[in-house]
Amino acid sequence: MLEGNMRASFRRMFINLDRVLLKLASAVLLFCAWSGDIHAGEFKKTNCWLEVPRDRGMTCGTLNVPENRKKASGTEITLSVVVFEPDRERHEPIVFLTGGPGQPTDIGDREDIEAWWQFISDQNWMIGRRVVVVDQRGIGKSIPRLSCSRYFKADHWNSISLSVDAEISFDKLMRDEVVACRSALIANGIDLFAYNTAENAADVNDVRMALGIKKWVLYGVSYGTRVALEVMNEHPEGVSASILDSVLPLDIDYLKEDGRNLDRSLRLLERDCQKSKNCMRGLGDAVRAIVKQLDKQPVLLRSDDGENAPAQYRYVSGADFLELIFGLLYDRYAIEDLPKLVEKTYENDFRPLADMIFEHDDTEIAQGMDFSVTCSETNRSELPDKRLEYWTKWIGEADYTWVCPLWFPQGMTVSQKHPRRLDIPTLLLSGEYDPATPTHWHIVRPKAFLLGRSSCFAGLGTM
C-alpha cells in the first residue's frame, strides 16, 4: 500500500459516507420507475463474501467485459458488483463510482456493509432505489487487480530511514519498485493500455445493460466524476441524471494545474485567516518562506512513537511540505489546524510537522491502475511549470513526472476530449478549498459538463 509522500495517496480519492449535504440532491432528482427489459452480457450472481445484515437485501455478482475494446483478442476481465436492494423499489437505480484513480469500494466486512447502509439511509432521495456499487477494472475485488503493494515499500516512498546516518538512494529504490510492478503485471498478460477512463465508462454501461436497467443515476466522487462524464458523453441513453462530487472535467489536463490550484487554495486560506483573531498574519508569505528554506536545506525529523517503537528519521524539503499541505486541504477539520502548522513551522518548531509526516496513512489504492489512467491521460512532457513559482520544484518532483516514462516507456498519445452538451439534469458538489478539483473548473467552463436545463450548482464547503 502506498503511503505519505505519494501524491496518488492523497488525490481524488476520498468518500465522505456521512456527508449530509448530499441531501440537497433531492431537489433536482425526480425520477421514473425502473424497467428491466435490456440485457447485454451475463451478470453472474454469486454468494456474497460477507455476512448480509438481517432484514437487508443484497445481490453480489460478477460481469465479464473485454479488457481492450480496441483489440479483437477476446481477452476478458471480471468486474465485481454489489447491489444494495431496497425494501421496495420505487425509483430508478443509482450507480456509485469511486475516486482515485484506483480506489476500491471498500466492501469487505460487516462494518463496511453497515457504513454503506447508513450512508444510503441518511439520504432520503436514495431510499427506494437499488444502489449499484462496482469495483472499477483493475481495483478491489475485480480481476485482475493492478496493485503494486507487494513491490512498494512504504518507507521508501516516505523516504524514511531507521538510522540518522543512513545514506539511502530513495529515488533509485522507488524507480526499481515501479519497474518491478510494471514488469510483473505485463508478465501476467495484463494490457496496461486498456486501463483508462474510456474503458471504465464502457464497463459501467455494460453493467447497466447486464442488470437489465433501462436508465439510472450516476453518482461519482472525484475521479469517479470523470468516469461519469465519460459515460454521459458516450452512453447518454442510459443516464437519467447525475451527481458529481468534486468534479474532474474530461478536457482538463489536471496535473498541470496542481501548482496554481494549490496556490489558489492557500490564498483562500490566507483570506479567511485575516478574518480570524487566532490566525497568524502573512500566512502566504510564511508558506513561501518555509518552502524556500526547506528546499535550500531540508530539515531532519525524528518520529516520537513511544519508548517501544524504533525511531524513524526523514529529511523534509519544501516540496514535501507542500505535498503535506496539499493532502490536508482535503479534510475540513485538518484545514482548521493548518494555519497553526504553518505558524509553528515558520517559528522552527517542527514537532507538529513531525507528527503529521510520520502519521500512518491506511488509504488503499491500486497503484498500477492509478498510473495507467493518469499517465495515459496527462501530457507529462509539459508537467513542470516554467515560471519560477514557489511550488515549481514540488511540481517538477511530482511522482507522475518520473513514474509515467517508466510505466509507458514507449510513450502515450494523449487525446483531447470534446464533451458533448446534453440535456441531463446534474447536481455539482464542490469544496471551496479543494486543491485538486477546484470550483472554478465548472463555474467558468460549464460546457465541459454536459449540463441540461435542470442542472444546478451547489457551492458547498470542503470535505
Image (cartoon, grey):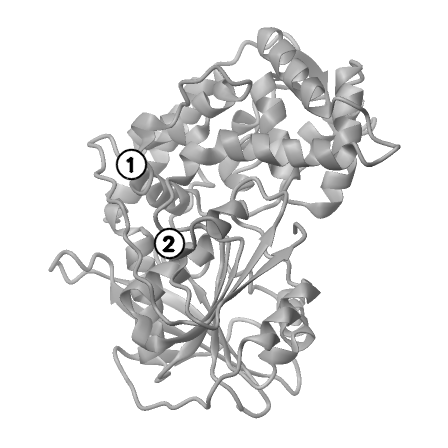
Marking on residue 183: 1
Q: Is residue 109 shown left or right of residue 104?
A: right
Q: Is residue 422 above or below residue 151?
A: below
Element on which disc 1 rests = helix
Q: How many numbered discs? A: 2
Q: Are marks 2 and 1 in contact (CB under 8 Å)?
A: no
Which residue is located at x 48 percent, y 73 percent?
A: 454
Mark before the other along the chain sequence, 2 or 1: 2
**Can residue 78 be spotted in the picture?**
no
Query: Dot 1, how many residues are within 10 Å of its Cα: few (below 14), some (14-19), or many (20+)?
Result: few
| Apparent side of residue 347 relative to residue 99 in the rendered image (left or right) | right
Frontmost of labels 2 and 1 is 2
SS under mark 2: loop
Q: Is residue 410 left or right of residue 146?
A: left
Residue 279 lies in quadrant: top right
Identified at 75% across, 29% down, the residue is 355
Q: In the image, what residue type sits under mark 2?
A: Gly
Occupied quadrant, residue 263 = top right
Q: Which residue is mark 2?
A: 138
- Residue nearer the viewer, 128 or 103: 128
The image quadrant that residue 79 belongs to is bottom left
Q: Position of residue 202 (x, y in %)?
A: 29, 64
Residue 241: horizontal and vertical position, in percent?
45, 73
Q: Is residue 25 above or below residue 75?
A: below
Q: Where residue 214 sits in the image (x, y, percent)?
A: 35, 84
Q: Amino acid at mark 1?
A: Ser
